[in-house]
Amino acid sequence: MDSLTVRKKRREESRDRIIFLVTIGISAILLVAAYGKWFYPAEWLKPLDRVIGIFEFLFVGFLLYARRLYKAWALAAFIFASWGGYAYFWYQLSLPCHCMGELLRIPTGLSLGLDGLFWGIALSFIYGLGGGRRGVYWGCACGVLGLGLGFLFASGVYTHFVIPQQG
C-alpha cells in the first residue's frame, strides 16, 4: 500500500473512533434521561414521560447501530432540534422541562444547551460522513422545523397537562 492509502485509512479509523466515542457519550446522557422518565416520571406527565422514555431508549439503539450513516445523523439533528424546541418553551416560562424526569432536576437552560450541542455534533457528523454542505443545509432546515415542532408540542403539553393541574 502506498502512503496516501495508509493515511486515508488511518484518518477514517480515527474518524470512526471519534464518532463511536461521541455517540457513546450522547447515548449515556440519553439513557439517563430515558431511565429518569421511565422510573421517575413527573407526576402530571406520567404517560407522556413513559412513551418518550421508550422512544429515547430506542433512539439510542438506532444511533449506536447507524452511527456511520450521515442520514442517521440528519434524523438525529431533527430530533435534537425538536427536543431543543421543547426545552426552549419551558425555558421561556422559567419552568423545569423535566427532560430527565424527576431523577435529575437539571436547569432547563442546561437541557437546552445539551440539545444545541448534540444538534451541532449531528451537523458535523453529517458533513464528515459524506453528507457535505448540502446535507448540513438540510440538517439546518430540518433543525428549524424540529425546533418549531418541539415548541408547539411543549405548548400543547402546557395547555393540556399543566394548566388543568393548576385548577
Image (cartoon, rainbow, N blue to C red):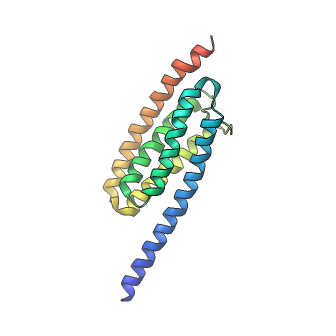
Q: Position of residue 109 (x, y in %)?
A: 61, 39
Q: As displayed, is residue 100 above or below residue 62?
A: above
| Rendering coords of residue 123 (x, y %) | 43, 54
Numbered marks: total: 0
Of residues 127 and 39, the one nearer the viewer is 39
Residue furthest out toward the top: 167
* Residue farthest toward the left in the current orientation of the protein: 134
User: Where residue 61 appears, x then y in whole percent?
Assistant: 49, 51
Q: Does 64 sit above or below residue 8?
A: above
Viewport quadrant of the N terminus: bottom left
In the rendered view of the protein, which quadrant contains the C terminus? top right
- Residue at position x 44%, y 48% from top? 76
Could you say which is closer to the camera, residue 85 or residue 59? Answer: 59
Q: Where is 64 relative to 165, above or below?
A: below
In the depicted structure, whether residue 132 falls above or below residue 77: below
Residue in the picture at 40% in, 63% down: 128
Q: Position of residue 66 (x, y in %)?
A: 42, 56
* Residue 15 visible to an observer of this rendering: yes
Instruction: Spot the residue most to the bottom.
Output: 2
- Towards the viewer: 25 or 4: 25
Q: Is residue 101 visible?
A: no
Which residue is pictured at 54% across the width and 59% down the height? 22
